[in-house]
Image (cartoon, coloured by chain):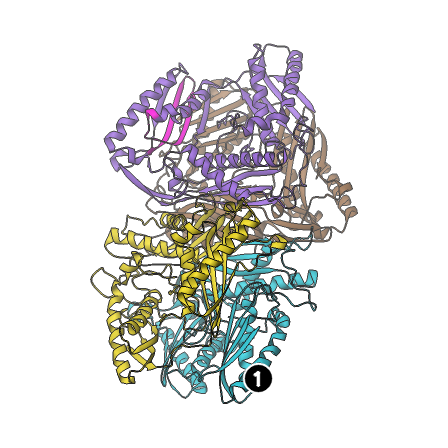
Chain colours: A yellow, B purple, C brown, D cyan
């Protein structure tokens, strides 16, 4: 295991691009249902056998439906179709089969039920699955409280800390819009929110696309008023996060003169043609940041015990945060991790740290190594936080 | 149009085979959801345009799920998968699309909800569809209250009357078992009931397969008691219908010594591997009767306005019934009808009547012709009875 | 086991309806691919284990495609979709899996390849399947050359003999049209042929729908000429079968004045919206005959060892034929058989024979019993004829 | 439009992670079939209308099959299932439908046929699709040779140049293995090749997973020999690219002592459980590089006329390359681009350049701007290179 740290300049680019796809976006729905299924399988295996058996359900596709929305109403014409794909241990022992199919259907529907107000899991969604059964013998690399699981692939994990103001802004805006408070203040906003920020020096341009609920808005005038009020509210939120000049555009593709508005029946663009997949949206930190190190690993749906594509994405974030939060000499850090297939998950091939610090190279190296090692000891317990929903993954 | 009647001996075979698949049987479920969708489309078209537009959704397939049932409990492991197939007018006018997909999903789920107590449309069933859109131009052969629709195919319809005691027995036993009263007296019986009768001269052997609800039955003993009570109850019902000697077997494939019982979680064998299709079960009169004239036309899912495979199945039964019920000289009748594609549905290619009667051939011919012609005038109004659910079709 | 024979009047109705769906009809395609898969599974099991393991793949659905045909050309816009459904033993022993999926895909494609000239299995068809795995333990009721298999269901089989002239006519016309000779003489005719006959006393009206291959026909004139030549040829064939007056209509729905012709790119109406299912077309004797006894059992796709719905359909035809062909005192016969679930297939619940004969009732009974018993001894060997393709089933 | 350039240190990290998924990897297959379909649609639209109509088919899912491979042979048990998803203009004018479905099936099969030797598109693959139809009115933003198309989304494009030795090494190794020469020298290697490099200072560890063709390898010994020969060959290639110390591992998960080898029947792990999606693998430059700027935009399947997620990924690479290749003062460059939905594709929201150069900041800015503007003029012609296959996209 190589643990390697290096001093690097801080992250202070003159420009930034940052994006977040909210929980109602078609890609995020795919992440959500896949992860929900993984949690559901994990709990089932735990309850039946005391350990989490092998599964990897990190693929799904969503085929957008068809709908017609108008001020004051609307209807879904063709349901959204979701197919969950992957593999999972299908048998506890010779006689006891795992209800993979039923769990898949329930996971998808409960994700919808818990995250949407106007998307009906019963009539607006078709949930299908093609999940192959793996064997119980396949993965014996985890016994609860016993051994260290072995990495089931050679995968990257990447993390950085802290977030820039632009990044915080993007995160907070979506968070607010999909919070209880946000929905109370703006019930007309749907769950499909996409926030994009471009910063050029001191100016941030925030572009927000938010699917509006057609039946809650009487007419063009009301729509315009809601947009106006929402704009004001978001400026307020922005001003609490940054002093930079923020320019804010909501539903910029609206063309009132042509009667074009971003109206939906259900609160998501998936109702009308936008398709989705797992792992095509937010990274584990909730953001898409082309200026920053990123991994292409999808975290959603992977088993939380041995899949280092998932675990190292979390650990790399944790290490970066810890380095910065617990040592005032470190201003920022990027962490890169690479697993070794077949080796204990506590023993990656390599951990690289880039840190902006006034520590000496030696002091950094030694400190980074100790933090990394300490965090790696957490790896075998990470599954608990994951299945309890205490880690955000997308 | 040829209307032809012929004197024939009465139907008094020394033997009979008669079968009925109850409303929870996989084939009947397919019939039910297809017909429900046709009704739902018909109502939608009527409401939007004042007439029923072209559709033909008379195909569906059900892929049985997987489940595990035990005395006192059970679980569905893999949901049942249903795919509805056919075509339907997809556009009311240039801009208004018909919600075919949503109606399909809703039709299937509401059939399940209305006909089952323990089959959950949300987590035990996947409803998919592949329904192609037809054009509004395609079929202009029906304007409500105006013209006579034109037959959209060359199809047979067949009917006979009256039912034998064996036939009545089969019908009544299923009816009772799936009635409110039946479910009150025997809540443990599921909706998937298959009744089969073999009569040899004066002896009727009645074989009944009824999916039992596992969680309502504590153990083998209780199961045996319910079977015993049910047997007694059905003998009672049988004795009200026939004086013939009835031998009654319930769930004859049970093998208590091997722990084999007909237990289900949901009340249908579809939960565990039995597949189904439209039109593979009961004929329009509710029965399968190899000794009797039968048509192979599926009635379920066909449009109720111009599809003579549906309409003539009903009309042939109506004519046979009328001939016998309204004329005491006619003891029994078989009626065969054949449509002429492209001709008004009131003008079939041929209507053949075989009647057991003491009327002269001439009198029979003339009477049969008048009854047939009179009933044919009802054809253009038949859709009302159909979409109001006042005609039994399978 | 009851074997019961009864004298009955001969089958001489004044009217008849007879239909046959040719090998390219959507329903027949479903029959064809299901049966092909059953044969393919049977051979695989035999080769690997020396016996035919349990399977029942008697469900399939075909969703018609979309195409555009014009004189001299045409193109398929959307492929035909076929889904095969059922269950089959998935494991030879602990380690050896049966390639059910690959066999399903290959069976469907080879049916297409062997039966069509212009339907491309590679780009005109999507073959999907949802076949559940059964266990090897499930059915141990057959050891090649050893025991008598046990009936796996309570099913009817029905047969009659001989065919009327109308029935022969329908069979022969389709046979000719889909024969090598027919295709040599009329290459422009597709494989989707539907023949329907209505006889009223001495007049037979023969309605033939035959999908024409668009690219082989230059224009309206050539189409008309081919229809004319074909009509003449079929009159010739008809005159060799019956002396009755035959009226013959080919593609009666053509409307030259509106430019409507029955043109297809591939030779089947499935290319353009006609859907299909297993068991909705021809009975085991190749015909649909509402005036005659029929069973609703699909024969295609059922296992040839223990599924009496398949076996008894064949046996009932065999018995009827034998009764008539080997005894000049018997003019015609109907045979009805009913299996007993769990009993050896050589021991049905009941065999009923209705025969038109000048034999005494006693002689008939005794003779019928001996023929039936003899034929029943063939039941355990029937699978050979079936998997060698020597029995026609639909 | 902001064009902004900034001097930055060169890219000289002490560590690197680089990965490439070869053309036979499940994710790459998804990229390949989606892009093939986009090209196929583009050509169809061009031929029929002179312009490329709207489409976006950038989603697909691959469900791995099941197979059994052994030295000297093997068989596919369950085919691979691929579903293509997206939307495309379905109608050229009122009467002329676009054969989307057939093109989808053909695209997938021809990708397989052109890129694999042992994967049979006919029996090893099921190709399905759920592509919704868009309207011709939707996108009128492109007339060949006329106007500038309008960006159909707000998307990122990211590029960098030049490649490091590690990056070149990864690219070249896969290229060789899947070249004609590579297959001639090592026919036993399949098309599913995954190359991963970790560099730490001067040491590169190259991990290569290559699916071997089971039937071409007689036994363990031959397998070992091939691996040995291949290792030598790849060291040779590596030494032509870098002077750094290379350590090379082929199929590191093999465990000869347990009989575990990376054997496949078809040359791809998709045959046996590995699933795939579009956009989860290589970026437009053919690599996955977590230390480098990356976009999450999938390029495959997007329309080549107005989808800036595709176009800007190519342009950003082109600009970076041009900056470096045409100006010896610039050693390396990163380029970031962001489109403006609804604006001409030649007018992005922002272009950011980071360059390592000895030019002054002003000189860099002015030069970068001129190069960027020049390249942007190419944007409206990019579609030609794309549909002629002259741009590598994944």
Q: Which secondary structure dominates the residues rendered in magenta? A: strand
Q: Residue at x 62, y 21 (%)?
A: B375
- Judge left or right: residue A179 versus residue D101: left
Question: In the rendered image, which quarter contains the N terminus of chain D?
Answer: bottom right
Q: Residue furthest right?
A: C221
Mark 1 surroundings within 10 Å by alpha-carbon count, few (fewer than 14), some (14 through 19), many (20 or more): some
Q: Residue at x 65, y 35 (%)?
A: B152
Label 1 element class: helix
Seen from the viewer's position, the closer of residues C8 and C85 is C85
Q: Is residue D158 magenta?
A: no
Is residue D80 visible to the viewer in this orientation of the structure? no
Judging by the rendered image, the residue that carries numbered circle 1 is: D367
Question: Over which residues does the magenta segment extend?
Answer: B184-212
Q: Quadrant of residue D385?
A: bottom right
- Answer above or below: position of C361 versus C71: above
- Judge left or right: residue B288 versus residue B148: left
x then y, percent, for residue B293: 55, 25
């Amino acid at each position: 295991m190589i643990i390697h740290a290096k001093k690097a300049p801080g992250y202070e680019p003159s420009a930034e691009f940052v994006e977040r796809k909210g929980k109602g976006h078609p890609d995020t729905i795919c992440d959500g249902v896949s992860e929900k299924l993984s949690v559901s399988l994990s709990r089932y295996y735990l309850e039946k056998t005391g350990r989490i058996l092998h599964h990897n359900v990190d693929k799904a596709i969503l085929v957008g439906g068809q709908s017609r929305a108008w001020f004051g109403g609307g209807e879904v014409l063709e349901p959204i179709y979701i197919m969950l794909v992957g593999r999972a241990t299908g048998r506890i022992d010779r006689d006891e089969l795992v209800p993979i199919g039923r769990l898949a259907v329930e996971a998808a529907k409960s994700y919808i039920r818990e995250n949407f107000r106007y998307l009906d899991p019963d009539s607006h969604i078709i949930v299908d699955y093609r999940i192959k059964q793996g064997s119980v013998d396949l993965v014996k690399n985890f016994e609860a409280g016993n051994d260290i699981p072995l990495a089931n692939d050679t995968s990257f994990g990447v993390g950085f800390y802290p977030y820039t103001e632009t990044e915080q802004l993007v995160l907070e805006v979506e968070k607010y819009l999909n919070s209880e408070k946000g929905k109370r203040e703006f019930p007309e906003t749907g769950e499909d929110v996409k926030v994009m920020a471009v910063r050029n020096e001191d100016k941030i341009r925030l572009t927000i696309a938010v699917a509006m609920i057609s039946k809650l808005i009487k007419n063009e005038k009301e729509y315009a008023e809601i947009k106006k009020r929402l704009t004001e509210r978001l400026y307020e939120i922005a001003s609490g996060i940054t002093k930079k000049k923020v320019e804010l555009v909501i539903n910029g593709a609206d063309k009132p003169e042509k009667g074009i508005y971003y109206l939906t029946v259900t609160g998501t663009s998936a109702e009308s043609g936008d398709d989705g997949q797992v792992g095509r949206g937010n990274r584990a930190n909730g953001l898409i940041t082309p200026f920053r190190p990123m991994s292409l690993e999808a975290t959603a749906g992977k088993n939380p015990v041995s899949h280092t594509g998932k675990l190292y994405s979390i650990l790399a974030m944790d290490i970066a945060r810890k380095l910065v939060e617990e040592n005032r000499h470190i201003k920022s850090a990027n962490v890169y991790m690479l697993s070794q297939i077949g080796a204990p998950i506590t023993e990656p091939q390599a951990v690289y740290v880039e840190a902006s610090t006034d520590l000496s190279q030696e002091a950094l190296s030694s400190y980074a190594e100790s933090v990394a090692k300490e965090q790696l000891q957490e790896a075998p317990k990470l599954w608990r936080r994951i299945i309890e929903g205490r880690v955000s993954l997308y």
